[in-house]
Image (cartoon, rainbow, N blue to C red):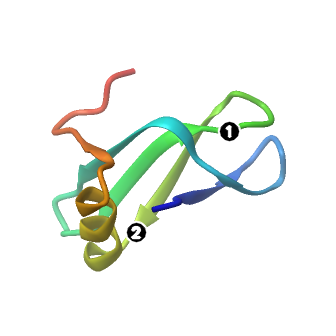
Amino acid sequence: MELTGYSIKAKKVVTLQPPVEIKKNPNSTYMAKGKCPETGNTVCAIMNAKKGAEAIASGVKEVSVFSY
């Protein structure tokens, strides 16, 4: 599954580059964190429970706490 997020520095939607990590938020939403392929900065994407569960099922690493 290809996850996308908005890169502030590139000013456009980009595909998150591996390693991508997903964390479940307390309000049952998910947040994916990866790298921008153009700038190398961290890009985050917030998604609903259905899309987050699909991403985890497709093999994206789920973490309880993000590694910085």
The amino acid on which the numbered mark 1 sits, given as a three-letter code, is Cys
Q: In the image, what residue occupies the spot 33% across and 48% down?
A: 60
- 37 lies left or right of 48: right
Residue identifier under label 1: 36
Give the labeled residue for mark 2.
Answer: 47
Quadrant in the picture for residue 50: bottom left
Q: Is residue 47 left or right of residue 59?
A: right
Q: CA distance from mark 1 to mark 2?
A: 18 Å
Q: Residue at x 50, y 57 (%)?
A: 45
Q: Position of residue 57 (x, y in %)?
A: 23, 62
Who's the residue at 83% across and 53% down the image? 11
Percent position of residue 20, x then y = 43, 40
Query: Which residue does the image show at 25% across and 74% down from the upper left?
Result: 49
Say above or below: 57 vs 63: below
Q: Amino acid at mark 2?
A: Met
Q: Residues within 10 Å of mark 2 (few under 14, many from 20)?
A: some
User: What label sits on residue 46 in the rendered view?
Assistant: none
Residue 14 figure quarter: bottom right
Q: Is residue 46 found left or right of 4 in the rendered image?
A: left
Question: Dot 1 surroundings within 10 Å: few (below 14), some, or many (20 or more)?
Answer: many
> Going from the N terminus, do you reach mark 1 or mark 2 first?
1
Can you tell which quarter of the image residue 5 is in? Answer: bottom right
Q: Position of residue 16 (x, y in %)?
A: 58, 47
Residue 18 in the image, given as x and y percentages of width and height: 50, 35
* Element on which disc 1 rests: loop
Q: Quadrant of the C terminus?
A: top left
Q: Residue furthest top?
A: 68
Q: Is disc 2 placed on a helix, strand or loop?
A: strand
In this rendered view, identify the residue nearer to me: 56 or 35: 56
Instruction: Check contact, mark 1 vs mark 2: CB within 8 A.
Output: no
